[in-house]
Amino acid sequence: MNWSEFENALKNLKDDGEFSFGFNWIDYARYRIDEDIINQHQSDLAAIYQSFNNRGSVLDLGSGSGLSSLCFLRLGFQNVKSVDLDPYSIEAGRITMNRFAKEDLIRWTTEQGNILDPSFVQRYSRKFDVVYSWGVLHHTGDMWEAIRNAAGLVADGGIFHLTLYRSGNLYTQHLRTKFSFTLSNVEHKKKILFDYLNLIERTVNHSVFIPKDHRGMNHFNDALDWLGGIPYEVANPDVLEAFLYSLGFKRIHFSENVQGGPFLDVYNKR
């Protein structure tokens, strides 16, 4: 990738150089999501939920692009609520739904909210059959409280589905890189991102715009998502399992990536 290609593609950094998860997701929702990406993510979710008979309500907590909310609708869940702290993420979800799910909008609602806000948590006297939070709670600034609050929104017999960064010896290095990016001016941010993307492109040996993971996220959007991801905490899967067991949950699915990368946990509320 040369500098000209990079600048033409750089729609997901705000003019003032500040990072917004939602601003990044708008770019992804508008230009990157397609039916192949949707079908892949839907297939991954279907593999987890094929034995879960309750197709009732879903809370997509930290909904980002709205891709997961869309897939839950397509899987036949009756009510899907997308919640995000970032207003740009709410807009990204609307873009995704208007592109791919206009006929299903009656079953989909959005709300701007903060899982660390007690008034937000107390608002829901009726719990959700699925609380889904992919790669979000470790960015709240108080991960364990966020996990506790989110778990409290799961109905009896329901599913708590979350993905978190795994603890490991790269945490300090990652944190240093993220702070270096976050505290830089806009021109230095561009330089850091440009160098990071070219490193990725050499490593994977193909375009950074090719989807790379089960959400269909490509390396370009994912790089900015990762570099700008502050606050940033990590969890040990065994500690998380013990914590959620104390709250009445039993692990029913687990998978992990490389050390320091994300791991996926799915729990059933006993």
Image: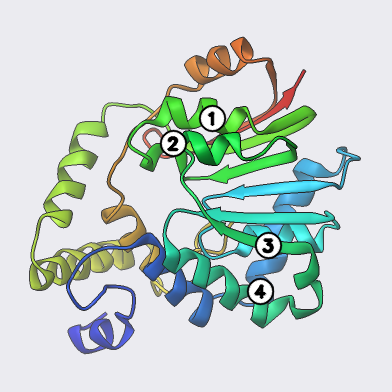
Q: Residue at x 38, y 60 (%)?
A: 21
In the image: residue 25, left or right of residue 104: left
Circle 3 Cα neighbour tier, 10 Å, few/some/many (<14 / 14–19 / ≥20): some
- 4 or 2: tag closer to the N-terminus: 4
* Residues at marks 1 and 2 touching, judged by CB atoms closer than 8 Å: yes
In the image: residue 224, left or right of residue 128: left
Circle 2 Cα neighbour tier, 10 Å, few/some/many (<14 / 14–19 / ≥20): some
Identify residue for label 2.
116
Of tags 4 and 3, the one toward the viewer is 3
Q: Residue at x 32, y 63 (%)?
A: 20
What amino acid type should be assigned to the residue bearing mark 1?
Answer: Asn
- 1 or 2: tag closer to the N-terminus: 2
Identify residue for label 1.
149
Q: CA distance from mark 4 to mark 3?
A: 11 Å
For residue 173, above or below residue 8 = above
- 2 or 3: tag closer to the N-terminus: 3
Q: CA distance from mark 1 to mark 2?
A: 7 Å
Q: Residue at x 38, y 40 (%)?
A: 140
